[in-house]
Image: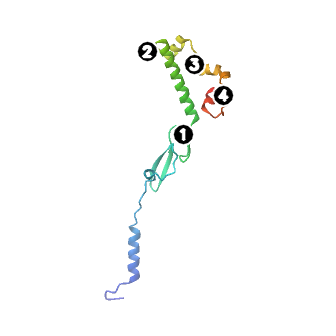
Amino acid sequence: MGNGEVDRHRVVVVVLAAAVSCVVHIDLDECALNTHNCDANAICTNTPGHFQCTCDTGYDGNGVSCGGNVSVSLALTSLYYRVFHRRCLRSILGISWRDHVTNDELMARSEQMALHDTVANRRRFVGHILRLPTTRPTSLALA
C-alpha cells in the first residue's frame, strides 16, 4: 500500500469503532408506557433501564403483588364506628361542638358503653357474623 492506497481492513475497523462509540442508551419509561407489572395497589417508579414497584400505604407485598393490611383496615373501621357512635350521641343529646364537651364526658352524660363493648356483649345475637371466616375484618373486630 502506498501512494494514496487505503487499507480496507483499517477503514472497516475505524468505522465499526465509531459506530460502537456512538451507541446511545435510550431508557423507556415503563411506568408512563404502562408496560410494568406492578399491582393495582402499587406505585411504579421509573429507574434507569428498569422500574420499581412499591405497595401503596395500607398494603403489604413486594409491589408486584400487594395485599390489604388487615390491621390497618380494622383500626380504621373501629375508628369510624367510634366516631359515628359519638356523633349520634351528640345529636341525640343536643350537644354541639360549641359546647366543648369531651368524648369521655359525652360517654358519661349518655351513660352508654363504647360501641365496641356493646357489640362484644351482644355477640350471641350476631351468629351469622361469627360464622364468617376468621380472616374477615368483621370477625376480627368481634374477637
Disc 2 to disc 3, C-alpha distance: 20 Å
**Residue 74 coordinates in the image, percent (x, y):** 57, 30
Residue type indicated by callout 1: Tyr
Residue type indicated by callout 3: Ala
Looking at marks 2 and 4 on the same chain, the residue that comes earlier in the sequence is marked by 2
> What residue is disc 2 on?
96
Which quadrant, please, contains the C terminus? top right
**Residue 113 appears in which quarter of the rendering?**
top right
Disc 2 to disc 4, C-alpha distance: 37 Å
Q: Which mark is residue 128?
A: 4
| 130 left or right of 24 in image | right
| 7 left or right of 77 in image | left
Within 10 angstroms of label 2, few (less than 14), some, or many (20 or more) residues?
A: few
What residue do we see at 57% from left, 18% from top?
114
Looking at marks 3 and 4 on the same chain, the residue that comes earlier in the sequence is marked by 3
Q: Of circles 3 and 4, which is in front? A: 4
In this view, which residue lies farthest toward the left?
A: 3
> What residue is disc 3 on?
114
Residue type indicated by callout 2: Ser
Looking at marks 1 and 2 on the same chain, the residue that comes earlier in the sequence is marked by 1
Disc 1 to disc 2, C-alpha distance: 37 Å
**Residue 117 appears in which quarter of the rendering?**
top right
